[in-house]
Image (cartoon, rainbow, N blue to C red):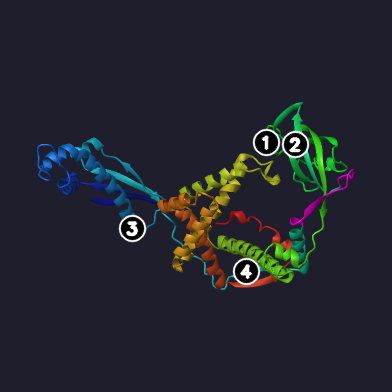
Amino acid sequence: MEVTEKSAEGLDRRFQVKVPAAELDEKLQARLMEIKGRVHLRGFRKGKAPVSHLKKLYGKGVLSEIVQEMVAETAQQAFAERDLQPAGQPHPHIHSNMDDVLAGKADLEYDIHAEILPSFEPADVAGMELTRPVAEVADKEVDEALERIAQQQTSYAPRKAGQKAKKGDMVTADFVGTVDGEEFAGGKGEKIDIVLGSGSFIPGFEDQLVGAAVDDDVDVKVTFPDDYGAKELAGKDAAFAVKVIEVKAPEKVAIDDELAKKIGVDSLEALKTRLKERIEADYRQMSRGHVKRALLDKLDAAHDFDLPKSMVDAEFEEVWRQVQAAELDEEDEDKSEDELKGEYRKIAERRVRLGLVLAEIGKRAEIEVPKEDLQREIIATARAYPGKEKEVLDFYQKNPVALQQLRAPLFEEKVVDYILERAEVKDKKVSKEALMADPEGEDESA
């Protein structure tokens, strides 16, 4: 077998492979000898059929398998011997007449084509200067969290006969909705609880029930939002005939030890401590998001190398699919499709570049994702599909590609941790609002 490099342009590599017919026949004879003892042919004792007879019966099929195996093996061999790593699955281009090859009349000749991963020296991350925004948890935030918990525990008591509903009250009602005089799917409800001012219903619906009393009939007129989930109703005017069955006022919930015990905490102080710790954990996560963004920006700026077009194309297709499935931001609405594609292709290039940089840093640092971490992630994913946990677990056990997609973000976070441990990271106190603001373009990271 001869493997020669046919061309090397940028990251593109092509190899020419020639396997003599005699070598193929030798492999075929060896494979037929392997199966000889396993087949039982009519007229022959088991294992006694001559190889020449087996060749007539199975030769073409077996040789076809050998050719497929050789193409795959030589593709790996051609790149491995030159210390090259394909950016994707190498593509074979067979030039021989396969009928002649399978008949043993011709050599097997084919090309192997693939892009390779670029070779580059990653930037030295030791001492990289980064700023991490941090914010302290104020007592006010803990108090606001307590208020939200108290609201969630709110109970309601019927108002006195004839009393009118106020904002914050719970109104129980029957209603029938119509558009252009016709009832529509999902527009009818019986004994539905509506908290006035909660914003749970169509804008304007709850406001028109303020002032209603038990047994009142209220004609509610609203307009469905333009972005309403049911497209056939979006932007349309609707009328609801509402019958008020009951009006209940909220009963104030005291923020005390009893409230804490209702949600399984021993005391109010213990609840405050738990809430503060939870908010602090949220803040740490936000701080990490900002410093990670800054880190990725520096890594992106520090590296400039050719990118495999196939990887960029695949990443762009995924990015563009997400763009098409979502609403455009206001600043993008006046741009042409070509302009948008150009911008999002740059995002795809950034993601591929950063992915390669992080992978190389992780490789050199010998960073791995422990099996237990991956197992926890699989279990967490499975729990998101109640009743189908076993199917999800089986799916990842049988699909290496899907498993790698699950491993990739875990690996990325470990590499980021590795870099942050070696970088010069300075904390900077900021406001809660500044910390909660999304890092600009964070979704453009690796």
Q: Are marks 2 and 1 in contact (CB under 8 Å)?
A: yes
Label 2 or label 4, whichever lies nearer to me, is 2
Q: Locate residue 154 relative to residue 22 in the image: left or right.
A: right
Q: Which numbered disc, 2 or 1, marks the residue that appears first in the sequence?
A: 2
Element on which disc 1 rests: loop
Q: Is residue 47 magenta?
A: no
State the separation of the CA atoms marked 3 and 1: 55 Å
Res 77 seen here: yes
Which amino acid, mark 1?
Ala
- Tell whether label 4 touches label 3 (CB within 8 Å): no
Please name the residue shown 71% across and 68% down the image.
271
Closer to the camera, 39 or 109? 39
Disc on res. 80: 3
Report, in whole angstroms, how far the alpha carbon at label 2 lies from the one at label 4: 48 Å
Q: Is residue 97 above or below residue 343?
A: above
Q: Which mark is residue 130?
A: 4
Q: Quadrant of residue 229?
A: top right
What type is the residue that disc 2 sits on? Phe
The residue identified by callout 2 is: 224
Instruction: Say above or below: 105 vs 183.
Output: below
Task: Look at discs 2 and 3 and give the one toward the viewer.
Answer: 2
Where disc 2 sits, the SS reads loop
Label located before the other in sequence (2 or 3):
3
Dot 1 or dot 4: first in sequence order is 4
Mark 3 vs mark 1, foreground winner is: 1
Mark 3 and mark 1 lie on one chain; the one further toward the N terminus is 3
Q: Give the magenta-colored segment's residue range.
A: 151-165
Residue 305 visible? The answer is no
Q: Residues within 10 Å of mark 1 (few under 14, many from 20)?
A: few
User: Mark 3 is on which residue type?
Assistant: Ala
Which quadrant is home to the C terminus? bottom right
Residue for badge 1: 230
